[in-house]
Amino acid sequence: MNAPVKLTLKDYATDQEVRWCPGCGDYAILKTIQKLMPELGVAKENSVFVSGIGCSSRFPYYMNTFGFHTIHGRAPSVATGVKLANPELDVWMITGDGDGLSIGGNHMLHVLRRNIDLNILLFNNEIYGLTKGQYSPTSKVGTKSPSTPDGSVDSPLNPCTFALGAGAKFVARSIDTDMKHLTAVLTEGHQHRGASFVEIYQNCPVYNDEIFEHLKNKKTAPDTRLVLENGAPMIFGKEKNKGITLNVQRLALEVVTIGEAGITEADILVHDETNKVMAQMLVELQAPDFPTAIGVIYNAPAVAYVADVYSQRIEVREKQAPADLNALLRSGHTWTVE
Amino acid sequence: MSVVEEINQPDVANAGSGVVVRFAGDSGDGMQLTGNNFTEATAIYGNDLATFPDFPAEIRAPAGATFGVSAFQIYFGSEDVTTAGDDVDVLIAMNPAALITNLKELVPGGLIIADADAFTAKNLARAGYKDNPLEDGSLDAFRLISIGITKRVVDTVKPFGLSHKFAVRCKNMWTLGLTMWLFDRSRDAAIDGLRTKFASKPDIAEANVAAINAGHAYGETAELPTGVEVYKVPAASVKPGLYRNTTGTESLSYGIIAGGQLANVPILFASYPITPASGLLHTLSGQKQFDVMTFQAEDEIAAVCAAIGASFAGSLGVTSSSGPGISLKAEAISLACATELPLLIVNTQRGGPSTGLPTKTEQSDLYQSVFGRHGDTSLPVIAAKDSVDCFDVAIEAIRIATKYRTPVILLSDGYIANASEPWFVPDINDYTPFPVEFEAEPEGFSPVNRDPETLARVWAKPGTPGMEHRIGGIEKDAVTGDISYDSENHQKMTDIRKAKIDGIARDIPLQDIAMGSEKGAVAVVGWGSTYGSIHQGVKRCRQDGMEVSHIHIRHMWPLPANLGELLSGYEKVLVPEMNTGQLVKILRAEYMIDAKGYSKVNGQPFKIREIENEIKALAEVVK
């Protein structure tokens, strides 16, 4: 066999014209993933992208791998079938806040609960783009949209909270235009055996522009982002002097300033990505009182569903007689007519 | 399916040539188990037979309630039996509710065996009896054996030390023993079965065996009323060979495994529990030694979508449900049509609409199967006629799905799924394999390349180098497979999809005639589980000298190529269906013939007499 040729970003791009709106965050995510793919050590023919419906779900058409653009909300189920049929495949699932958490919320719950070995990327722009701007299940209260002209009144869902509640073993959050951070998070998620859930804050320049601007703007980002690193203290801020502590009396996280009120770096909580209770508190931190946690929030590997299905099958096969359909047809009570 | 090769006696309603027995009791009384044991003994005896399990939706209704009555009917005889029988000759009633709900089916002079111990004041009141019918003479038109079964059973099993609750549960086996005596059946298979089933609980096994033997001994020794003696039903003349009993659920499961083997593709069976379809999931999940994987999804939609994902990945996705669940799957089925992936959808029909009658039979999803999707999505539909036929129908459905890369809907129903029939055990080596060829040649590859003859799209599975491609629900260019919103292209793709499905008509057998001749006064056209009743009804009319033929359609869509011409050879076409007239309208629309419908939707199969009367009424019009 010839030595494998090192692939590049271009090998993962298709000849299709990319048709997202100018300025859409999806472009940046696409570029990051096309660049990342050759680094993952997976044969191109073993990569499969499965999506539902929505702007983000056009993604597979732009990836020169196997791809399946399915129907609204059902990508988790189709991807589950792909993985069950062939566990060797490296399956990526692309969805959005409407596709993954509204019409497909039930499937998302179960794909995470079962821990199917998929790379799940949820592009969250807090709005419906493809259907022209209606509010989504992650839109903030008061979002004005064609279907909520006086502002939405229902409470939004936090995707990472949902994922943790559903039993996901890998939950992370990143930002569309931060290629370096997104690459690191996706790489770690890819290494995780089981469902890895990555929420990507994605800007919709047409219907919900700049909602994540405070996290992206270089001036404000240091004070609004809590960049998590496993084993490192949760420190943030321009001066790197702010940190997160646990108020034991209130059982709540607090923002403190190192050097004030006798606080030292030793008082700051250290991120332990295997701690689920901590993860549940971190995903809920919101502006303006708190920075937004990004990075790998929770990572506690467990055996993935498909692996269990196959081991159970092997176990049964070792105990039972080999497959013989004629023998099966003749099993149970039979009689002979002379 | 009847297994009879030749008929020993002329077709007359002769009590000696066939008997209908109905076991009825509380849903917790074990009537289905009793019926199945009796069925097996009857098959071994050599009678031809057909059964009709009839049970309520409630798992355990309150004891003695009329809505909780569970019944099992068997018709067996020395000639070809294709229905569970019109009227009951022998009724076994384990309580007043079972008697009052089934008595109307019993022929005058028919035999009632009743457990007198269960006719308590409370049970009588619950069933709606003012006086005890076993004592007030209201059953004088019948022959009655009123026995204190419960007390006898409790005495019989006393040596085994069972609790009262478990002791009473043996009464169904006591009743089985008595029935075995009444029809001269062997108890051996039932006794063997009990010892296997309760291998880890020998006390329970032996108590049940003792109950069977005691019931049998009662028949031999008790002084039964005049006229009650062992029935003689001669064995039928059946094709020599190896037999077993099968329900539609079993043979359909085995047919799916067989189809996968013949196509040389693994099966992913993804389903969500629903009555009466769940049995397929249960049966297949126990067959892990075969290349069949089962997946209990979170809902109907997830089930069909997982099956579609599996087909994309190179397995054959199979999903199953009943009507309401198929409705939920509809959008995804259209995705499989648009992406031209193979998929098998099994619909075990039940009474509708909505939750309807989950445990009762109906064939009212034909429209749903043929037409029930958005946007001109046509797909093949195939229907099983009885429990045994499910095996071959599953293989045929998989052949079409894999060869034409299309979803196929297979229609069964609650009656077929649960009814047990003797089955001449097939040999898988007698079937011609139809192995799938996966695309692997990168040169000139496009995901919309087609077989020029079948128009089937290439099947290129992930993991194959050079085959990377994208599919999806958006309309695709007919040449490149890329997204296309071009209007001419949509016309072309719609035409291709239609031509592909229509073309399957060239690849299915021409319509044959189940009985009768190619021309004549009346053709009775049926599909699905009405086969048996129509067959017997037509046979009786022919014996009366009428010019009637029976045509049974298996391929519901596309219809067999010669069907229109065939039907035009009859003066009248009658289409009996367990719906309000679905096939009849399709036939009228397709062939412009003046077919007449005959509808029945009461949750029970057609009676032979009903078909016979309808044919005769129509023939009067012809005269």
Image (cartoon, helix red, strand yellow):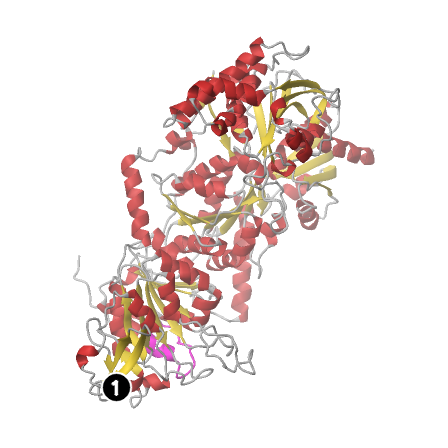
Vertical order, B68 against A178 (above or below) = above
Name the main secondary structure of what is drawn in magenta: loop
**Looking at the image, which is closer to me, A232 or B62?**
B62
Q: Residue at x 31, y 58 (%)?
A: A117
On the question of residue B401 being in view, the answer is yes
Asked where in the image residue A173 lies, by quadrant, the reply is: bottom left
Q: Position of residue B568 (x, y in %)?
A: 71, 41
Point out the stretch of residues depicted in magenta. Answer: A15-30
Q: Is residue A237 left or right of residue A203?
A: left
Amino acid on which the number 1 mark rests in the picture: Gly
Which residue is under mark 1?
A: A237
For the C terminus of chain B, the image quarter is top right
Q: Is residue A17 above or below residue A71?
A: below
Quarter residue B3 falls in:
top right
Q: Position of residue A45 (x, y in %)?
A: 29, 60
Q: Quadrant of the N terminus of chain B?
A: top right
Nearer to me, A268 or B464: A268
Q: Which is nearer the eye, A178 or B591?
A: A178
Quick one: SS at disc 1? loop
The reply, left or right, for residue A257 in relation to residue B114 is left
Q: Residue furthest front?
A: A249
Q: Position of residue B121 (x, y in %)?
A: 66, 29
A70 or A9: nearer the viewer: A70
